[in-house]
Image: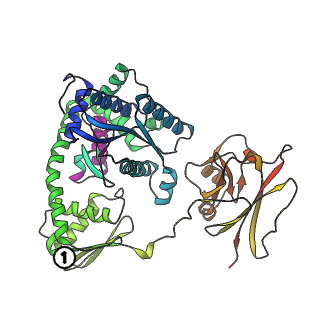
Amino acid sequence: MNPTVGSDSFEEQVRAGAERCRLPAEGGRLLLAVSGGADSMAMLEALQCLQKGGVLRMELAVGHVNHQLRGAASDGDERFVEDEAGRRGLAFFSRAADAAGYAQRHRLSVETAARILRLRLLAETARCWQADAVATAHQQDDQMETLIFRLLRGTSFRGLCGIRPSVRLEGVRFVRPMLSVSRERILDYCREKHLGWREDATNADCGFARNRIRHRMLPFLHRQGGRQMEAEMLRLAERCQSLFETVEQQAQEQFVLAALFETGEQVVLNRSVLEDCSPFVLGEIIRQCLLHLKVGLRDYTARHYQTVIEGIYQGRQRCVVLPGEIECLVNEKTLTFCRRKESAEPSEPEPMVLPIGQTGQFGPWRIRSAVVEKAADGWKRPSAGAKQWTEYLDADKVRGPVRVRMRRAADRFVPLGMSRPKKVGKFLTAVQADEALKKGVFVVEDAEKILWVAPLRISEEVKIDEQTGRILQLSIWQQVM
């Protein structure tokens, strides 16, 4: 890239960041991950300015992920980004993510689930569009938050690298051209360029650890040490990144030499190859094994890695129990990472569409639907030996197809007899549902709302009234075995 903008400009900082990410000087495609917030809008503007100025000779497109966590606000973000991409003449790709449902199924925080799905969907979009890389709007303050978060939680040498300018995730290269730019400078740039952006109200919620660091700890550190401490921490991250590239290269080479057997369920390594490696290299090899088994690393700490490393050096037969239902088996000759099959839990039933007039199976439940005239009963009830619940809804108040799924943490509905929405979890507490019932409760919904928190309560929004003409009759039962 040949700079054609002033050295003090925001675009010049982004250009320098793009060079550190090793983006091609000419040709190729770059997918911009745009949430609609100030950071991503500034990145979109700057990179398009560099493209129009002939500095960045890559085709650009906009990618957006709707996490469906804030209802109408999330949909508003999507429309805002789509309109902005259209105004700029850029291709727009949007994907929807069920972050709340994924968090519940995999026992993750909603924040972690959203991050996992966002990376996955952006990577899928990049592959479909044949992009060379995905650009995200991580900036200097994000880097500081990450470093502090990891230090407070306990981190290894790898964690001190913070957010790296370029990294391969989900088989796709992700680049961060704004890592050297402060949030303050980004906001100034947005105002200078008269850019609009969307505010996510959850970013102010100090119930999240990162938000506490952002709104409380970082301002305190700035008051105590000015920007000097921040500059030193950022330099530390850069030095660690440089050193870690060497560690990563050695780990890849040693993993190839040590690997004896690999499947989706286990990885077996030659211990004699590993015992000559440094602890830093071993830590990265262990991480590669866990990623190969598709294990989330959120619950892993330095202690877990250290316990496995001690087993490698000592060589005594032992079994190390690790997070994510993983065991590490150490003996004289091998090191084996495998899943703990005996502790596997049955998976939740997948969401299903319920065709009207038919009977479907959802987990242990049989579900039947029928549209009948008011005060009519148009189908045969289940035979004796089945426990049944039946509800009657105003069919004309149902919008779109009827779906059945397990409940999610963020679910809300208007319980029959109430006038305002209530979280399903709080509703279950209010009706004193026991733990077994809470786990078994599922949701019947249409395209807009929850119709029935089964088997407990239908929604006030679909109750039968004097104007009701057609009735949607829903019955569920579990067969007695």
CA neighbours of label 1 inside 10 A, class few (<14), some (14 to 19), many (20+): some
- Image quadrant holding the N terminus, namely top left
The quarter of the displayed image where residue 236 is located: top left
Q: Which residue is mark 1?
A: 315
Query: Most extreme residue toward the front, as rendered?
Result: 27
Indicate the secondary structure of the residue bearing disc 1: loop
Query: Most extreme residue toward the left, as rendered?
Result: 276
The correct choice, above or below, for 221 with respect to 461 in the image is above
The answer to if 345 sits in the magenta stretch is: no
> What segment is highlighted magenta in the picture?
132-158
The answer to if 148 sits in the magenta stretch is: yes
Going 13% across and 54% down the picture, which residue do you hit?
246
**Figure label count:** 1
The quarter of the displayed image where residue 478 is located: bottom right
Q: Amino acid at mark 1?
A: Gly
The correct choice, above or below, for 194 with respect to 235 in the image is above
Position of residue 197 measured from the top left corner of the image (x, y, whole percent):
43, 29
Q: Relative to residue 385, is residue 481 drawn left or right?
A: left
